[in-house]
C-alpha cells in the first residue's frame, strides 16, 4: 500500500508540474460495495471493492501507453497491484492495432471491462467460474485487425504467458501451452430498432500439471438508444469449458447469463439478470452415472446514474443450486454499490 | 498494349477517386460537401437525432472511420466520450488526432462560455475549452469551416484554390442566411434547457436568462426548477428552447410553473425530417419564436 501511495503521489505531482505530461490523462475509480447476505452475515459490511488509478495517453507519435493500478481489500489489507500496463498502437499496421504488456484478455464481454464499468454489481456464476470473478489479466501480446469486408468484422488474437490464470499473488508455473485466444466480433445495425454486437470466442491453455483447459463462448450486446439514453440494453454471454489431462477426470461445464435492462428515465435503469450454470460431467459417486444439476439465479438490479461520473446501484440475488438427489441450496443477498470516477471522461463503449 | 490499358484505367480511377470524409454530425457533413463539392464523398456517423455528447463508440463507426481519408468533428470535447475510442480502434493512422486527416472545426472557432478559475466536476460536465455547440450559429460554422479547407487542401493540394473559392461562397451563404433569419427574429428574452442554443442566442443578439440545467449534464432538481421558473417570470422570459433529448416531463413542469413557452427543436441538422440542412434548421429555430 505504501508503494501504491508513493507511486500515486509521484505521478500526480509529476503530472502537475511537468509540461511534458500535459497530454497524459488520469482517472481514479472507486467501487464501494455493501453486500447483505440473508443466510450468513459474516461478510455483511460496506467495503471498497477496488480503488483504481488509471494513466493513459500518447507515448510518442507512434505508440500509446496505459498504466492501471488497482487496490483490493484482501482480508483486511489493501493490496495494490498492476492490473494493466501496456504499450500499443493503431498507427503502425494498417487496419490493425496491437498491445504488448499486461492487460485484461480481449475475450468475451465482461472480461474486457473493469468491474466498476459493468452493468450490474457482481459477476454471474459463469464469469466467476471461468474468468475468476474480476476477469483474467495476463502479460503477453494481443493483435486486432478489421477485415476488409463491407460489414464489421474485428478479429483479435492473443498469446499471454499463462503462468497464472485469474487473480494470483504468486509467479505461477511455466505452462505446457501458454494462454492463447481468439475473438471474432461482428456488428449488425437495425437502424431505429437498435444494433447488435456479437462475438465468438476461443481460449485455451495447458498448465504446468498438464491440465488442458478449453473455453468456447459467444457474447452478445444489443442496444436501442433514443437521444442520449440507452432505452434498452440486452447483454449476454454463453460459455462452455472442457478440462482434461493425464491424471485428471474430464470435466465439462456450460454457463450463461442474460441481462435485459430498460431505462425508466434519463437517470434510472432497471434490469433483471438471469444466470444459468451446469456441470455436465458431474456424476454420482455411487455408480458413476450422471448427476443432473443446475445453478440458477435471478438478479433484479436498479441503477441510478447521478451523472456520467457516479452511480448508485442496488441488486437482489436469488441463487439456487440444485443437484439431483440432494436438497437445493438457496442463497439470497442484497447488494448496494456506489461507483465514483474522478478525472478523465469515461469512454462510451458500445 | 495490356500494360498501357491497365495504366490508362489506373490513371482514370485515380482521377476519379474522391476524398472520403467521415464527419461526426450532419451539420459538418454539409459544410464539407459545400467546400469539397465533387472532390469529396461524405458520410456522417450520427444522424442528428442523437445527442453527440452521449453517443457510443459503435463498431459501424469504427468501420467507417477505418475507410476514411479525413475525419471531421466539432471538437471542444463534444465527442470526447466516444470519438477517441473510435479513432483508436479504427487502425487508420491518417485520421488520428494530429494526423493529416484529422479535422476539428472547433480549433478555428473562438468559443463562448470558456470556464475560468478552477475547473472540476462540481461544475457539472463542463467543457474546459468552451461551449462546443457552435453549429447553431451560421457565422461560427463558417469560422469552423476554415479547418475543413485546411484539411482538404492537405489531402489534395492541387485543389486548394478551388476549396478556398468554395469556402468563400459557403461563408457568403452563411452570412446571407444569418441576415435573413435575423430579420424576422423578435428581440425577446430567452432561456435554454441545456447550453446548446447559446451560440444561436448570442449570434442573433437575444438576451438569455441562462439554462434550466443549473450545471451542464445535470437534470434540474425540483428546487432548481422553482428558482428558475420564478426568475423566468421576473425577467419576462418569453421562450425556452430545448432539444428533443431533454426530459419532456421536466419541460412540461417548467412551463406550468413559469408560464414560459417551451419549444422543442432539433439542435443539429438531421438526416431525416424537416431540419435536413443548415438553412432548414436555422429557419425552424427562427419560426419557433413566432
Image (cartoon, rainbow, N blue to C red):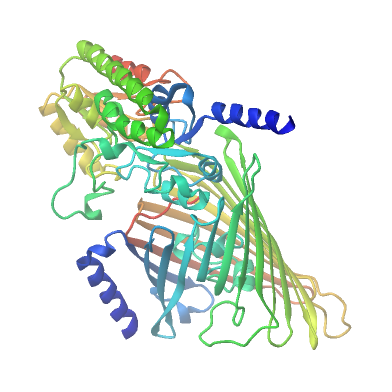
Task: Point out the image quarter for the N terminus of chain A.
Answer: bottom left
Q: Position of residue B59 (x, y in %)?
A: 55, 46
Residue A135 vs A57, above or below: the answer is below
Q: Is residue B81 left or right of residue B187?
A: right
Q: Is residue B120 left or right of residue B80?
A: left
Residue with the most extreme front position: B1
Q: Position of residue A141 (x, y in %)?
A: 57, 69
**Which of B285/B115 is in front?**
B115
Q: Is residue A326 visible?
A: yes
Picture residue at 60% right of the left edge, 67% below the top: A127
Q: Position of residue B265 (x, y in %)?
A: 35, 24
Q: Is residue B256 visible?
A: no
**Which of B145/A126 is in front?**
B145
- For the image, the number of numbered tags is 0
Q: Is residue A32 left or right of residue A163?
A: left
**Which of B195/B61 is in front?**
B61
**Which of B220/B32 is in front?**
B32
Q: Quadrant of residue A159?
A: bottom right
Picture residue at 58% right of the left edge, 74% below the top: A132
Q: Position of residue A298 (x, y in %)?
A: 60, 60
Residue A3 vs A290, above or below: the answer is below
Q: Quadrant of residue A296?
A: bottom right
Picture residue at 41% right of the left edge, 27% below the top: B159
Amino acid at each position: 500500500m505504501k508503494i501504491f501511495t508513493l507511486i500515486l503521489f509521484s505521478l500526480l505531482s509529476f503530472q502537475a508540474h511537468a509540461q511534458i505530461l500535459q497530454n497524459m490523462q488520469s482517472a481514479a475509480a472507486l467501487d464501494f460495495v455493501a453486500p447483505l447476505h440473508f443466510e450468513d452475515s459474516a461478510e455483511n459490511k460496506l467495503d471498497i471493492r477496488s480503488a483504481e488509478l488509471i494513466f493513459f495517453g500518447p507515448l510518442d507519435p507512434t505508440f500509446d501507453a496505459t498504466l492501471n493500478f488497482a487496490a483490493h481489500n484482501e482480508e483486511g489489507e489493501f493490496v495494490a497491484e498492476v492490473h494493466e500496463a501496456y504499450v500499443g498502437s493503431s498507427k503502425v499496421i494498417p487496419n490493425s492495432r496491437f498491445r504488448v504488456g499486461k492487460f485484461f484478455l480481449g475475450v468475451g464481454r465482461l472480461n474486457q471491462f473493469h468491474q466498476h464499468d459493468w452493468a450490474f454489481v457482481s459477476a454471474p456464476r459463469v464469469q466467476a467460474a471461468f474468468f475468476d470473478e474480476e476477469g483474467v489479466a495476463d502479460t503477453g501480446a494481443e493483435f486486432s485487425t478489421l477485415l476488409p469486408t463491407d460489414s464489421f468484422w474485428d478479429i483479435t488474437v492473443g498469446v499471454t504467458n499463462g503462468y497464472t490464470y485469474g487473480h494470483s499473488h504468486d509467479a505461477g508455473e511455466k505452462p505446457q501451452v501458454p494462454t492463447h485466444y481468439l475473438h471474432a466480433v461482428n456488428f449488425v445495425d437495425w437502424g431505429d430498432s437498435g444494433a447488435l454486437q456479437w462475438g465468438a470466442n476461443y481460449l485455451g491453455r495447458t498448465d504446468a500439471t498438464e491440465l488442458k483447459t478449453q473455453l468456447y463462448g459467444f457474447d452478445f450486446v444489443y442496444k436501442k438508444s433514443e437521444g442520449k439514453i440507452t432505452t434498452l440494453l440486452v447483454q449476454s454471454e454463453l460459455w462452455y469449458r472442457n478440462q482434461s489431462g493425464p491424471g485428471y477426470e474430464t470435466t465439462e461445464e456450460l454457463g450463461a447469463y442474460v441481462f435485459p435492462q430498460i431505462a425508466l428515465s434519463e437517470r434510472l435503469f432497471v434490469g433483471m439478470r438471469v444466470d444459468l450454470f451446469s456441470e455436465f460431467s458431474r456424476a454420482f459417486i455411487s455408480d458413476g452415472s450422471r448427476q443432473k444439476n443446475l445453478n440458477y439465479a435471478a438478479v433484479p438490479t436498479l441503477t441510478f446514474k447521478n451523472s456520467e461520473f457516479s452511480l448508485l446501484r442496488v441488486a437482489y440475488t436469488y441463487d439456487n443450486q440444485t443437484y439431483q438427489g440432494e436438497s437445493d441450496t438457496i442463497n439470497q443477498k442484497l447488494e448496494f454499490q456506489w461507483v465514483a470516477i474522478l478525472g478523465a471522461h469515461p469512454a462510451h463503449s458500445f | 498494349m495490356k500494360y498501357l490499358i491497365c495504366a490508362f484505367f489506373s490513371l482514370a480511377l485515380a482521377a476519379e477517386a474522391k476524398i472520403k470524409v467521415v464527419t461526426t454530425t450532419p451539420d459538418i457533413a454539409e459544410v464539407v460537401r459545400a467546400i469539397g463539392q465533387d472532390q469529396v464523398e461524405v458520410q456522417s456517423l450520427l444522424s442528428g437525432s442523437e445527442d453527440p455528447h452521449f453517443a457510443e463508440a459503435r463498431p459501424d463507426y469504427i468501420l467507417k472511420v477505418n475507410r476514411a481519408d479525413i475525419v471531421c468533428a466539432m471538437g471542444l470535447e463534444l465527442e470526447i466520450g466516444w470519438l477517441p475510442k473510435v479513432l483508436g480502434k479504427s487502425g487508420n493512422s491518417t485520421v488520428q488526432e494530429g494526423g493529416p486527416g484529422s479535422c476539428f472545426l472547433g480549433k478555428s472557432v473562438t468559443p463562448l462560455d470558456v470556464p475560468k478559475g478552477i475547473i472540476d466536476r462540481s461544475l457539472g460536465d463542463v467543457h474546459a475549452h468552451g461551449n462546443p455547440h457552435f453549429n447553431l450559429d451560421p457565422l461560427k460554422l463558417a469560422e469552423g469551416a476554415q479547418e475543413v479547407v485546411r484539411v482538404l487542401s492537405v489531402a489534395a493540394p492541387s485543389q486548394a484554390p478551388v476549396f478556398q473559392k468554395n469556402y468563400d461562397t459557403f461563408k457568403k451563404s452563411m452570412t446571407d442566411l444569418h441576415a435573413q433569419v435575423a430579420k424576422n427574429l423578435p428581440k425577446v428574452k430567452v432561456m435554454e434547457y441545456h447550453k446548446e442554443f447559446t451560440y444561436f442566442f448570442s449570434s442573433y443578439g437575444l438576451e438569455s436568462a441562462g439554462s434550466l440545467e443549473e450545471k451542464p449534464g445535470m437534470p434540474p432538481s425540483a428546487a432548481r426548477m422553482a428558482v428558475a421558473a420564478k426568475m423566468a417570470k421576473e425577467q419576462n422570459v418569453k421562450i425556452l428552447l430545448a432539444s428533443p433529448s431533454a426530459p419532456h416531463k421536466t419541460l412540461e413542469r417548467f412551463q406550468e410553473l413559469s408560464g414560459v413557452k417551451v419549444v422543442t427543436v432539433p439542435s443539429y441538422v438531421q438526416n431525416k425530417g424537416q431540419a435536413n440542412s443548415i438553412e432548414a434548421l436555422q429557419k425552424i429555430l427562427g419560426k419557433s419564436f413566432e
